[in-house]
Image (cartoon, coloured by chain):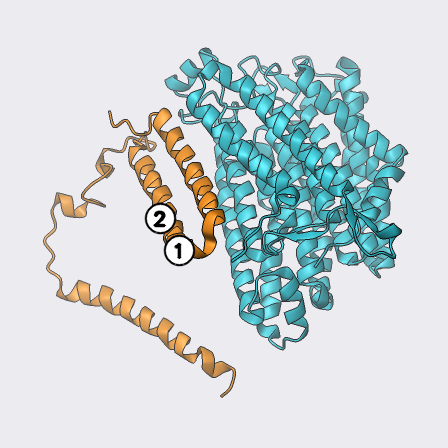
Chain colours: A orange, B cyan
Amino acid sequence: MGQGNVYLPIFFLGLLAFGFAVFSVAAASFTGPKRYNRAKVDAYECGIQPAQAQLGGGRFPVKYYITAMLFIIFDIEIVFLYPWAVSFDALGLFGLIEMIIFILTVLVAYAFVWRRGGLEWD
Amino acid sequence: MKVSVEYQALAPIIILLASGVLSVLVEAFIPRTLRRPIQLMLVLASIVLAFAYVVINATAELAGDPLVNGGQVKGLRELAASGSIAIDGPGMVIQGIILLISFVAALLLAERQIDPQGDAFASRSSTLPGSEDERQFTAQGWLQTEIWPLYLFCVGGLLLFPVSNDFLTMFVALEVFSLPLYLIASMARRRRLLSQEAALKYFILGAFSSAFFLFGAALIYAATSSVNFSTVAVAMENSSQDGLIIPGIGMIAVGLLFKVGAVPFHQWVPDVYQGSPTPLTAFMSAATKVAAFGALLRVFYVAFGGMRWDWRPMMWVVAVLSMVIGSLLAVTQTDMKRMLAFSSVAHTGFILLGVISTSAAGLSSTLFYLLAYGFTSVGVFAIVGLVRDASGEATHLSQWAGLGKKSPWIATIFALFLLALAGIPLTSGFTGKFAVFTAAIDGGATPLVIVAVVASAVAAFFYARVIVLMFFTEPPVDGPSVVVPSALTTVAIGTSAAFTVLLGIAPQPVLDLVINAGLFIR
């Protein structure tokens, strides 16, 4: 079997993914009902009110972003905790200490957000 | 499973990153008024401690080949962290240079006497430029101390970048030092919109170049099944997949050449150097360039060393373009910071001559050039920050007219730095250029050296023009004046000037040091 054949399935997978994306968007516009109202035209049904933007952009609350960032920090922590937990017995004490150091650094980020008022939702 | 970490070899990096974490805690728990002195102490102490560890590692007596030097080898040469970090002679020299520059630049960042409102950074970078909030925070004398944890993480990343021995570690290091730079670049106290624009441009273009770097690493991995430089080098010799390897090398080159600011990846340099707070420009133009060249050298000597006949033509073109376009565009600039930015692009071209040589002489001359250029660059931007009028820094060239009559000392030191950038004998710039050009001629790049000499002549013109402007024209009536700085900036400028003169008059000890540093380990 030649060198190129190995990548042929990957190529078709890409083609399939592209085709599915195009099909989904096209099918939705043909089959879906269209009843527009105010809420539907908004970007999202929650979060920042896009309609109240002042001239020149104005200011917008950063609360959502801080909450989202905090979530990501702990989400990533979990991502690293899982493989460590699976191979805990193999890594032993060394792995435990390294993991504690890792969790402590994440905790520092949390302490910073807490002390700087990132958790207050006035 | 036995896991071990070479703490001794990694100590400089660990110290900086741990201090960064500590520094975040200082921001969180220490009252606002006490933060500045504590942060400054922490930054300076950790840089000194890390430098001490680099010296200890570089002079350590190790058992080695019994035939060499009585069985004693000087300096660590070891692959740390399971082969993903290589601590060796050139790596430690580059770490030492970065730490020296970081120390001096930290003094500049801490300066708060030259601006009556405070230091070089916005009182609160979250306030809208020109808003009532901004006025209030400025009037109350708030200082942004969050630059210090960012600075520590940045220096930690810079230390890791040139010693990383695989593409993934190198990418992580690249992001660790880039992200704090993007942030600090946006925090200027004066001309905040320009600063924020510069930071956004830097971020977007930097993200693009990171993507190029990653794509290149993926292609190299596809061809060699490894991201480790040593393994990649061996696998490439036996590989026939040039279709993956050549684009891979090209894309990694794009990522790294962007960071050093070589043409055609230089568009960010003038905007970012101009818009950033001047102390940060001083740090960025010196330390980032040193670290990025360290990484460039390691990648192209260790991983792609066997492919040099394929990548050299590309580097030739980049070097020529950098030298010619950098010098020519610098002539047309009317803003001091932009002119120096284009001069930095031209210098990137000169340093690339050393990289192209792919020899021991090329490596050592590049290291020497980086030290010489780094200190001159810090000094030159330190002085740019001193020439001010009521609205802040006076960076337009016409405002510098007659400065030699008003402040002869500062103008003389500035002229010294400019002469060093031009490569006039008895300054560090001459020694550096001489070493790099010699290495390039030995490496068979004579045509490049001819271009470099012509470009140097063009460059000498715009440096000389500033000197003539300062000393031989009448000062304007309402021109800017040189602010008297505190001891911090004075020490920084003094150190830079001392290095610039010493490396020009007595370069031999440092030349010996970079030659004895040896080669990269595999």
Task: Decide: few, some or many residues near mark 2? Use Cα within 10 Å; few <14, some 14-19, many ≥20.
Answer: few
Q: Image quarter for residue B343?
A: top right
Residue B441, placed above or below residue A77: below
Q: How many marks?
A: 2
Kindly identify the amino acid type of the residue bearing the numbered disc 2: Ile
On screen, residue B508 versus residue B479, left or right, reads: right
Q: Is residue B135 above or below residue A46?
A: above
Residue located 58% across and 22% down the image: B40
Residue closest to the eye, B494 or B127? B494
Callout 2: SS: helix
Give me the C-alpha separation between circle 2 and circle 1: 9 Å
Checking the image for residue B399, the label placed there is: none
Residue A115 lies left or right of residue B253; in this view the side is left
Q: Is residue B327 visible?
A: no
| Relative vertical location of residue B95 with respect to residue B480 in this rendering, above or below | below
- Tell me what residue is drawn at x 23 percent, y 45 percent: A43
Q: Position of residue B113 (x, y in %)?
A: 61, 14
Front residue (pair B129, B208): B208
Tell me if I can see residue B506 in this picture. yes
Spot occupied by residue B454 in the image (x, y as percentages of width and height): 82, 48
Dot 1: element? helix
Numbered disc in front, either 2 or 1:
1
Q: Which mark is residue A78?
A: 2
Disc 1 chain ID: A
- Tell which subunit mark 2 falls on: A
Looking at marks 2 and 1 on the same chain, the residue that comes earlier in the sequence is marked by 2
| Residue annotated with mark 1 | A83
Using the image as rendered, state which of residue B163 and residue B63 is in the foreground: B63
> Residue A78: percent from the left, percent from the top?
35, 48
